Image (spheres, rainbow, N blue to C red):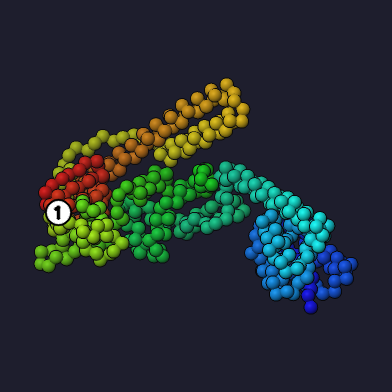
Amino acid sequence: MKHTALYLRVSTEAQAEEGYSLAAQAERLEAYCRMKGAAQFKRYVDGGFSGSNLTRPAMSEMIAAIRDGAVERVVVYKLDRLSRSQKDTLYLIEDVFMPHGVDFVSINENIDTGSPYGRAMIGILSAFAQLERENIFLRTRMGMVERVKAGYWPGGGKIPFGYDYDAEKGILVPNSDADTVREIYDRYLAGQSAGRIARELGLRYEQLVRQILERESNTGVILYRGERYQGRHEPLVTPAVFEQAQRRLHRAGRPRAAESGKLLTGLLVCGHCGAKMRYQKWGKAGDKLVCYSRDKSKPHLVHDENCPNRGVMACRVEEIVIRDLSRLAAEPELPHTRQTDEAACRRAYAQAQHKLRRLYELYAEAEDDTLREAIARAKRALDRAERALQQTKRAAAAKDESEARRALQTIGACWAELDNRTRQALIRACVDKIVLQNDRIEVFYTIGEASTQAG
């Protein structure tokens, strides 16, 4: 025997709202059934579910019952209890209710799809329900932007590693993992790879280390919808340390470090096809540096199956690199370049861009001489911000070069006493990449020089 389905829903925000509680809805729906003489009815209740989609347990159960032919009518207290989405409302009525001969009744709006007038009103009222939902979303989003501008954590999503969320204060607070975050930056800038850091600090995987290194919230900044805001939470690292880590992470063309103990691992590039190269045992002669395109032990690293690179003995390339680094260590150090806060310049540049865009929007609405003058000033300010940003990038490069020269001094002073891992770290601080093309050996250094020799 078919029954009348009474559908009830409340979202968490509407639990205490007068007229929307489950008890209030149930009372009105059952009174309707008694008035209409509908003796067989069943409640379908979704408590604490949003009306923005149809992914709700009771809704799914009711749709299944309709398709099984067990329902003759669906009754709700108000249209938006069924759904706040116009698309979903029309889908339920036109693709679920009507094909199965099920009438739909909304008590509050006095809608009954058993009449032509009721069916026409559905489209109109569901459009208003969706409009209200979008207005709620817009108000919530605007409130969140103001909250973030004031430096409070937006909430939601995953809390960054090294922090806990203090709900009472609305900010992030460092936890027991904060020191681990600082150590990750220290180790990475000292030359260790992300994989080695993960293993030695007991982290689950290498990618977690890279995610931590790239998380700008570690500097006290909040990123929200593509904009940067100064947060109220305590930074774990300085902006200078963060920017230095980013330069190493994203240095163009530089392969990741490997943990092999071989001096040049991770720096070798084939001059013919551009694939990576690796150490390969070559009988009693020692190791040979071979192109992955010829080696084929890792198919995803093959660039050219017919690569003609014959490779070169590792000892020869290592000898050239060490000799050249010793030469560079004896040269006078370049003068230091004044450093500027690159993060601050980036923020200033983004603010100048935003201001110029806003002025253009205002000008599009109403052309005005005052706005034209303001746009001209904003363009000049943007140019100044761009020049300042470029200067900080050049200064950052100079700082990297200074650090490389300090590594060179270590190489020149006590190379013989260093263990193999320390030697590898020092070489990585000084060398950007090594390009091998049969007998041609080209070494690119982080201090802006290059050396080309015959193998």
Regarding residue 162, the answer to whether it shows in the image is yes
Q: Which residue is mark 1?
A: 438
Q: Nearer the viewer, residue 253 or 213?
A: 253
Horizontal relation, residue 152 to residue 122: left or right: left
Residue 301 horizontal/vertical position (percent): 29, 60
Q: Quadrant of the N terminus?
A: bottom right
Q: Nearer the viewer, residue 285 or 180?
A: 285
Residue found at x 40% / y 32%: 388
Please tell me whether residue 68 is drawn above or below residue 75 in the rendered image: below
Q: Nearer the viewer, residue 405 or 117?
A: 117
Horizontal relation, residue 276 to residue 5: left or right: left
Horizontal relation, residue 418 to residue 164: left or right: left
Which element type, helix, strand or loop, lies under badge 1? loop
Identify the image quadrant of residue 265. bottom left
Residue 33 horizontal/vertical position (percent): 85, 68
Residue 109 horizontal/vertical position (percent): 81, 55
Residue 175 horizontal/vertical position (percent): 49, 57
Kindly give the residue lying farthest to the bottom in the view shown.
1
Horizontal relation, residue 373 to residue 117: left or right: left
What amino acid type is highlighted by mark number 1? Answer: Asn
Residue found at x 31% / y 55%: 256
Residue found at x 17% / y 56%: 309
